[in-house]
Image (cartoon, rainbow, N blue to C red):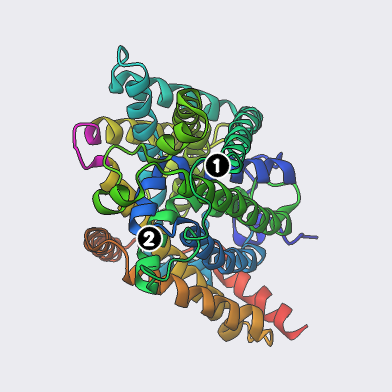
Amino acid sequence: MTTSNDLTRYGYRQELSRQLRSRDLVTYGLVYMVPIAPMAIFGSVYAGSGGMVALAYAVGVVALVFTAFSYAQMVKAFPMSGSVYNYAGRGISPPVGFLAGWVILLDYVLVPGLLYLVASVAMHATVPAVPVWLWLLGFVAVNTIINSVGIRMTAMVTRVMLVGELIVLAVFLAVAGWALASGKGRFSWDAFYNSDTFTWSLVAGAVSIAVLSFLGFDGISMLAEEAKGGSRQVGRAMAGVLILAGVLFIAQTWLAAMLVPAPDALLAEGDVNGTAFYDAAAVAGGGWLATLCAVATAIAWGLPNSMVAQVATSRLLYAMARDRQLPAFLARVSVRRSVPINATLLTGAVSLALGLYLATRADGIALLSSLINFGAMVAFLVLHVSVVVHHLIRQRSGNWWAHLVMPGIGFAILAYVVVNANIAAQRLGLAWLALGVLVLAGLYLTGRRPVLSGMAATEAAGRDMARV
């Protein structure tokens, strides 16, 4: 007898170890999202939103709640690693799945490199004697070793790191709240709505930047083959993490917006040095609080966040490789550790090379951020379409609310955000997609057209369930 999470009905063996509990998934999602993530990009979102930074994060939460709902629907249908790659491939067609996987690679492969780079630059600024390249090498080496040991080791380390991040956030919220109550800064609701600057296109453009803080909740779906409770547990963890992190993001950005020392200058000139949040922290509590927030952000991005990003990336490479859509050596799983070892090592190597190269470019961080956000949002759009095609059209579901209305609203919101995103990101993102089309054509020409294991059996089972 097979269960809903039995991979044999999809033509796969259970190679990864099911060791993760609900709290491990929630911890993983929170660490990936980083509860203090807005501290690093606060100034960019503030300037991009006309000061309505809390509104940008609130809209981001609303938009991605619909996306989390669609993830929950698809992870129940296909409880396996690969995320949107598998959902689109099995819900729509294998070629669409390949292109979805290709697009989300833009997110997953680049994210660790961005995190390492941001953390290394920040730590170099704090400890100038240690060069950026050495920080990069150290962060990559530590995370790759931990992730190669096994998923339980990763879960244990990230739990400890998460506690530290939450303590720093609690300190900032308490000190900032006390400072405002003591007359520092200026109490205002402008961070949520300012009639002088508000336009939906302005807010949507800022949301396209703020989305960087939310990336990670979707990474939980990559652990579907390692979760003890299976697909239902994964869906609940994604929704819970998204809402919890959203509340924390809104709270810290609202307080910081009221403590920005020169709001007009920040709006006019932007956050060139990336210190807007730390400047606000200095107003609230002095230099010690600014340093605490800066160092905590650097460590959070360089260790736990990069660590779980590497896990998600390696699982995507593993899923595509076992379907022969990437080189087969990436599908090798360590028998002793139950981790995709080659994919993990390759992710570390690519992240190191990418970080070292972009460290030499003045626009390295901005370029990576925009590309990552664009890739993620396009993949989310494909996810919503997958829900409609698989459940409503193929399975003939009668649940129009879950399988049409919810994904339809999520698609509309994200499409508006993508249209109003950075033009350079749009161009580079579309160029990456065009390259993916060429690669797909090459696969067809060489007789390796995308075929997902167990598709016929899955469709037959789906029809039987629909009749029931």
SS assignment at label 1? loop
Q: Is 392 drawn above or below residue 62 in the view shown?
A: below
Within the magenta stretch, is there residue 363?
yes
Where does residue 94 sit, x and y in percent of width and height? 44, 68
170 lies left or right of 373: right
Give the image quarter of residue 420: bottom left
355 lies left or right of 385: left
* CB within 8 Å, label 2 to label 1: no
114 lies left or right of 331: left
- Quadrant assignment for the N terminus: bottom right
Q: Which residues are magenta?
A: 357-364
What kind of residue is marked 2?
A: Ser
SS assignment at label 2? loop
The residue nearer to you, when weighing 78 against 211, is 211
Q: Is 62 drawn above or below residue 403 in the view shown?
A: above
Q: Which residue is mark 1?
A: 183
Please, what is the dominant secondary structure of the magenta stretch?
loop
Residue positioned 39% across, 73% down in the render: 200
Residue positioned 35% across, 72% down in the render: 201
